[in-house]
Amino acid sequence: MTDATANAPDAPKQGKHAGSLFDADVRTRKRNAAEARFRAYGLTAVGIGVAALIMLMASILSQGLPAFNQTFITLDVYLDEAKLDKNGTRDIEAIKKVSTFGYDPLIKNAMTSRMDALGVSAEEFGISGKELSAMISKEAAAQLRRFVIAHPDRIGDTVEFEFLASGRIDGYYKGRVSMESAEKDSNVTPGQLRLADALKEGGALSTHFNWGFITMADASENRPEAAGIGVAMLGSLYMMIIVLCLALPIGVAASIYLEEFAPKNWITDLIEVNISNLAAVPSIVFGILGLAIFINYAGLPQSAPIVGGLVLTLMTLPTIIISTRASLKSVPPSIRDAALGVGASKMQSVFHHVLPLAAPGILTGTIIGLAQALGETAPLMLIGMVAFVREFPSAPPEGFFDPASALPVQVYNWTTRADPAFVERASGAIIVLLIFLLCMNFLAIILRRRFERRW
């Protein structure tokens, strides 16, 4: 043994006092401690992320789930022929001339009759006739008018209807309104709330699932209880169809050319740099581009799914191109060489061998790009999809050019309104949007496993 070996600080002891190979020296113990700390840091980071996600989901669910339930008042309405069809001809055009104001007395009479049957009156609760009518949503008259126009043969009959209660009455049973807050609120009185309790005890008032939140269009600020996401869901669906039909073929074709066929020179380098830069451009810039080109120059209608779809296609293309090129690069070169070695052409080797193996990654990237486009708000606001839209768009292809809204824009609109009921509905729309995103991501996982091949 040399002197250098004998004097080494980490040299194993010899003879009777020699240490075991399983005994960790100082350096090993430090390394193990560092690894343990790093593992603890990682678990802490994951725990913080999971806790933040749970808090976010709990907040959204607690505020949004009540939007799917609504308070209804059940009334037996007599469709008075003297008010709805004076001539008795059942002429639809004549019936349509009766405005919603003509239906209000019918609803008020039905409300009074129901209260009489329950043995209660407005006077004992200290509310006026106007306050009594205010307990029912202003959407009730429009609902009754639509029914009469669709069923003119029912004029003269007594029909049972479920009318939406006003937003404040609904908020009373969801915890947004209390007796104390009603004393300071100009839109509701404690007497109305006590009467609502009496109607609930008598079976005339109930709270249950509201399909109208999913199927109805947006409503004015005076009717938050009647607002729905039907038009926004249809508008988002139309835009996703346009994005899928344009972004997928264009993005995949561009990726295949750049990765497999394009010569490597300064032109392709410039194209690749620009694609990478476009992927990092803020979404609102694409909205400005869509406003300038598709609306101001091309003359396409504002607030139309065709414009929103084109703008989102430009946004999604870089994501699809980058993910598709990464999938093509992941295919081993031996696959290409083997195909060329047995006599296949360059085109055949790409489309018969490389592309099928890259399909899982391409589909995953495409669905993730669509999910990202589904949640965009800023570019859609610039092209006018923030407008108030009550009518549903037609079926494609005409519906692509009709005014519509989108789910993220609808959420933004509702959060800017003063009534707390709209905040509840915004949270409910967020839940629907999250369900769509989860479904799209699950679809990406399923397709990836379905088309995954081993080599």
Image (cartoon, rainbow, N blue to C red):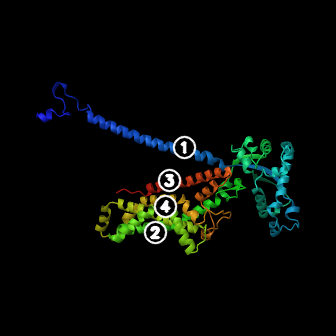
The 10 Å Cα crowd at callout 4, few under 14, some 14 to 19, many 20 or more, is few
Q: Earlier in the sequence, mark 2 or mark 4?
A: 2
Query: Can you identify the residue that label 4 sits on?
Result: 282
Query: Can you identify the residue that label 1 sits on?
Result: 55
- CA–CA distance between discs 2 and 4? 21 Å
Q: Earlier in the sequence, mark 1 or mark 3?
A: 1
Q: Left or right: 268 with respect to 201?
A: left
The quadrant where residue 5 appears:
top left
The 10 Å Cα crowd at callout 1, few under 14, some 14 to 19, many 20 or more, is few
Against 442, residue 300 (above or below) is below
Q: Which amino acid is tagged 2? A: Ile
Q: Say if residue 310 shows up in the picture.
A: no
Q: Is the C terminus in the top left, top right, bottom left or bottom right quadrant?
A: bottom left
- CA–CA distance between discs 1 and 2? 40 Å
Q: Left or right: 200 with respect to 399?
A: right
The quadrant where residue 274 appears:
bottom left
Q: Which amino acid is tagged 1? A: Met
Of circles 2 and 4, the one toward us is 4
Q: Earlier in the sequence, mark 1 or mark 2?
A: 1
Query: Can you identify the residue that label 2 sits on?
Result: 250
Q: Say if residue 398 shows up in the picture.
A: yes
Residue occupying image coordinates x 26% and y 33%: 26
Q: In the depicted view, which residue is nearer to us: 303 or 19?
A: 303
Q: Earlier in the sequence, mark 3 or mark 2?
A: 2
Q: In the depicted view, which residue is nearer to us: 62 or 207?
A: 62
